[in-house]
Amino acid sequence: MCDSLLELLVIVQFHRVIVITLSRLRQVVSLTEHGNFRRAAASLQISQPALTKSIQALESALGVKLFDRHPGGVVPTAFGQLVVAHTRDMLLAENELLRQVQSLAGLQTGALNVALGPYPSMFSGYAAAGRLLARSPKLVLSLHVAGWREVTRAVADREVDLGLAELTGALLDDTLLTEPVAGHHGHMVCCPSHPLLRRDQVTLADTLAYPWATVRIPPRLLGSLPRPIGAAGQIDPITGDFVPAVEIDVPMQLARLVGGTEVLALTPLLAVEQDLAAGTLAVVPLPGLPLHTSYGFIRRKNRPLSPAMEAFMQALRVEEKASARREADLARRFDPQRRAAARR
């Protein structure tokens, strides 16, 4: 019996039919990756003679040589490289099919693989996952945190079912669907002894004299950034992203990062709520900072929404509403400009 829907390939060559199993094609891929029959056989959990015999049978059936044998191992020929390229595509298609079947199985027995950008992971992603698992404890859920460009690539390459990140890259890919979900205001924070805190008001240009610590900023936000950028960072000449002087993947433990330094951390207040309350970070009096984070859902156009995806997305929307209320409260409590306006 076939062990997958792609178990049998039928190739017509010189008016004869050759049946090739997917397991044998997997052996070709493994042998290419390891370059050695012994190591490939061990990874496949079969004996070395069995692997050698299987590859020889495949070469005989196809009438071509798939590998050049050398004392140190094997190297795929042009025919071998062709087989490997097509086999990897088939394995990807098989995995995609199995993932969609599992995803559509429902909330009780299904699976969901989600990639989260830095801020969504902190503000709503994990909380939404908790809501979902409380309702569906048998759901197989995988969460991955990566930069926003990596999240878009993972969705486009079918590595995950759903992404939640900055939408700049996804909007340029016509194979993807996007849905804006949230936006959070950026604030500049620093250690309580920073020289900028001695001023009643700071301009954005003033902050460029100091190193910035933040995630990579997309080009759409850079039009209002004064030039030259100075010590804050630099512009990536290939992507147009702003790369801060201190680039971070996830904005955690910022008080420890900037403590005792003149580094300025650019972040929504939600990411530093405890540090603000403890007094280990302070908000720079910078009015109207035009830099903010926004993100949304990213998914492939040809992938139907499964019950698990829909439930996760709805749970995340609920969490984002709660995050927006918390963020407004933090601004009233800790933003010097908001407090001054309230007194007036």
Image (spheres, rainbow, N blue to C red):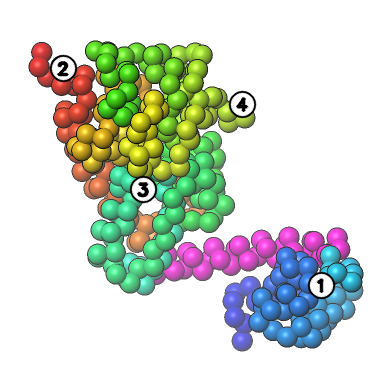
In the picture provided, is 15 more to the left or to the right than 182? right
Residue bearing mark 3: 121
Q: How many marks?
A: 4
Q: Which residues are magenta?
A: 76-105
Q: Nearer the viewer, mark 2 or mark 4?
A: 2
Q: Nearer the viewer, residue 123 or 201?
A: 201
Q: Residue at x 78, y 72 (%)?
A: 36
Classify the position of the C terminus by image quarter: top left
Q: Which image quadrant for residue 307?
A: bottom left
Type of amino acid under label 2: Ala
Residue annotated with mark 4: 237
Q: Earlier in the sequence, mark 2 or mark 1?
A: 1
Sequence-earlier tag: 2 or 3: 3
Q: Is residue 117 left or right of residue 125?
A: right
Considering only order in the chain, which callout, 3 or 4, is on the residue closer to the N terminus? 3
Residue 19 point in image, percent of width and height = 76, 79
The residue that label 2 is drawn on is 340
Q: Is residue 274 visible to the viewer in this orientation of the structure?
A: yes
Locate residue 257, reporting x and y percent: 39, 37
Q: Which residue occupies 16% across, 28% down? A: 332
- The span from disc 1 to disc 3 (Cα, nearest Å) is 50 Å
Near mark 2 (Cα within 10 A), the count class, few <14, some 14-19 or many ≥20, is few
